[in-house]
Image (spheres, coloured by chain):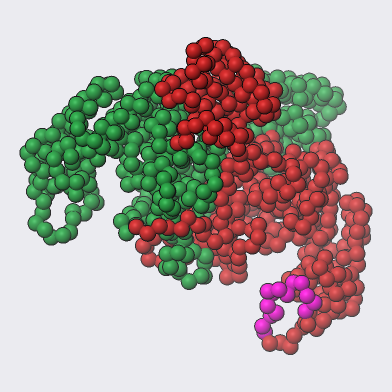
Chain colours: A red, B green
Amino acid sequence: MPRVKPTLAGGFRDYGPEDMIQRQAMIATIQSVFERFGYDPLETPLVERRAVLTGNDPNFRMHLFDTRIAGSRIVDDPEQAMALRFDLTVPLARFVAAHPDLPRPFKRYQRGDVLRGEKPQAGRFREFMQFDVDIVGSDQAIADAEIIAVMVETLRELVGIRFSVRFNNRKLLNGLPEYAGYDSSLQADVLRIIDKQPKVGRAAVLRELAKPPRAQSGTPDSEEGADQVEAAFGPGLSATAVEKVGAFLDLDGSTDQLLGQASDLFQGVRIAEEGLGELREIVIALRSMGVPEELWRFDLSIARGLAYYTGPVFEAFLEDLPEIGSVFGGGRYDDLVSRFMAGSFPATGVSVGIDRLFAALKQLGRITTKPTLTQALVTVMDRSAMADYLSMTGELRRAGVRTMVWLGMETGFKAQLAYATRQEIPVVVISGSNERHDGSVTIKDMARRRQTTVPRADLVRTVASILQTSDT
Amino acid sequence: MPRVKPTLAGGFRDYGPEDMIQRQAMIATIQSVFERFGYDPLETPLVERRAVLTGNDPNFRMHLFDTRIAGSRIVDDPEQAMALRFDLTVPLARFVAAHPDLPRPFKRYQRGDVLRGEKPQAGRFREFMQFDVDIVGSDQAIADAEIIAVMVETLRELVGIRFSVRFNNRKLLNGLPEYAGYDSSLQADVLRIIDKQPKVGRAAVLRELAKPPRAQSGTPDSEEGADQVEAAFGPGLSATAVEKVGAFLDLDGSTDQLLGQASDLFQGVRIAEEGLGELREIVIALRSMGVPEELWRFDLSIARGLAYYTGPVFEAFLEDLPEIGSVFGGGRYDDLVSRFMAGSFPATGVSVGIDRLFAALKQLGRITTKPTLTQALVTVMDRSAMADYLSMTGELRRAGVRTMVWLGMETGFKAQLAYATRQEIPVVVISGSNERHDGSVTIKDMARRRQTTVPRADLVRTVASILQTSDT
């Protein structure tokens, strides 16, 4: 048969041992924080019914990976069509709806790969890992505060202090039409324009808000690429409305200052006042829990793209790598479960982008990769003494030392030592004819570049003591 | 929008917290054994190019899940078509071929879900988790022995002693035509018939081997369901050949006895003698490594279905649940990497079926599930004292206690206690007006059904001491 090219599908990647060893350590840290906060593990399948993922929403825009059993007719019946999950939140909502007997609140974490068929870019892949915590069945702002506390604690353990967790409340944005006096049908347009502020500046945003709409052709502007330049048409806000939106954009200061300013600004706007009340509760809760003040703040620019958020929204940024965007994102989504069933299932949660965070920690030098977890290599000097090498290997493993016996096809000692050096294996065990004659064994401490010959019976003790005093 | 049914796609399943907590513990045990034997982690994507998975083999029979980005034209170009992995071995071979600079030997473990579009049955799902160890770049029988040792050690830690690891060598089967004197073109048929022995018995197998083939219609028997009944047609082996296959089937005894019998039987059959030499090396290596004799044995009935095995093959069975089949399976596959590149890449390895093993351990009572990892619930008696509850929660978490503060929407104390009881949370922390007045806190030890009121400052110490003396 002709050879097959050993290439990956476009937009996918491997993680070799060097990365995986540290990635697993990072994941273990995150998991232990999540568990300390009282979250339990859940696992849902990679494949879901398409209707579950899209909610049969005609405006669903995510690029899904469809899937079907090879050779089966393509199933267009939306009840049967299958696709790969694009996040872990929708499957959670499906799980909650399918298990009405779950304890409430239901606090779970889930880690898993999700797939999106977007155009692959440098550092962006079509399959990536998310690690989520969510609380289903609590409408309280202290639940949102707990999510923020989890974010802070996770990043404290992984990054130290050079990060900030920022939050806002969608209800403030929802109060904008009433506050500024424009029709709520213009809201999507207004928010899209406001979002451009970091790129185009305040003046351009206000100019665009005032621009009259395109003659009623019925075709809205294409959104492709439109989010970075000032458009020719706008929602046609009145001068007063534009001025009021400008005042909103001008709010600035510490968390407490912002809360005060926003309270004045939104006075009498019920939905926004409700949102501010929740934010105040969150702030009090964070202080009560002892979450360090300098690691979180209220930030009116946080909005979170996903349509399902209904209240507080959260993001986390690394101060030394602001350009990579948020490494954690989430919010409250009180209506998602009702896609599947009647009743009230308020929920809030957050998701870590494992791949992005891992790449960031590597870039920041917070992670030093190493080629192997193996601590000792038992070399093979003489194949006729294999029984002896294998028994040493067994002894070391039973003592908990991560040990390899040389299994390579190159038999020379040089190749074995080169392997240990390349793989940074800290201890090499050598037993040649001299050692066997003496009943001894030679042990090389690779990091300190020294070796010692000890009685065979002292093998395990000697290796263990080298490992204890090195830090591998 | 109309509601969507919260149902899973057919053949898929969720793992709720009760199962997941113990499943994760089981996986952690396996991982620590694999690491002790010198294996390092690797991760490859769920999605691969279809050609990589099938090798463009026209006889490829696995039911793959094809996948494509929704809305894209169905890609029939085999260079671009994508599918979901059905095992972790083929992606390993692809990875090795793509990275010619890998250290040799390359010892890796990989854990991940694989997907097969087979008809779902009770206890069998279309997505299931495998956990593999493999050694690439060693042609030595001690590498195969190490794989067997890994299997034994893993099952020792998980199951104790009621299991057996059994191995054989495909080279003995490959020697059958020469030994028995039949044409090797009949081999596939002969092996298929021999495989029926446990179900139909020795006599029926020999009868079928002797049956003449169907008139040359060119259409082979359908294999569906054909493996359990005696067929009307057969390979038409001569009486001598049938007798010799019968003698092969009669081999029986301990590992050493079988090795002796098989050596006599296969005398002069080169490929089989080579296989027996490897098995002898494996046995010596297992004894040298100190792998307990009663936990492994040479078993001529082990064959492993997958086409890519070329030498020793391994399976593991639980003695108390023989009916579930093997929980570990693998073997040597020296030619798989050459699907992708020239050169010699001998390899050997084994895969644990995580879901099957987990179900078995539950059935055997080796695993007792519990609803949550959470160790303490801080109840909310009075929402005006929330700051106090949150600060207790923060203190407990900082001390490493897995803690929840009550976030539920039911506010009564009864509901909170019922939650703790149902979730088997071992410690409940209570602070009502009395306690707050006294500067004390009440701590319920749920398992021992007793409670104590201590100074507020002793909260962490008291909770920790209850947890230390219970075993949660």
> Relative to the observer, which residue lies in front, B331 or A221?
B331
Instruction: For residue A95, say whether it is visible.
Output: no
Quadrant of the image containing the N terminus of chain A: bottom left
Q: Is residue A5 left or right of residue A423?
A: left
Name the residue furthest left: B239
The image position of residue A409, as x and y in percent, is 45, 36
Examine the structure image and report whether residue A212 is included in the region drawn in magenta: no
The residue drawn where x is 82% and y is 40% is A291
Quadrant of the image containing the C terminus of chain A: top right
Q: Is residue B98 left or right of residue A163?
A: left
Q: Is residue B197 left or right of residue A432?
A: left
The residue drawn where x is 36% and y is 62% is A71
Residue B4's place in the image compared with B465, above or below, is below
**Bounds of the magenta span?**
A218-231
The image position of residue B341, as x and y in percent, is 44, 53
> Relative to the observer, which residue lies in front, A254 or A130?
A130
Residue A365's place in the image compared with B376, above or below, is below
Q: Main secondary structure of the magenta part?
A: loop
The residue drawn where x is 45% and y is 64% is B79
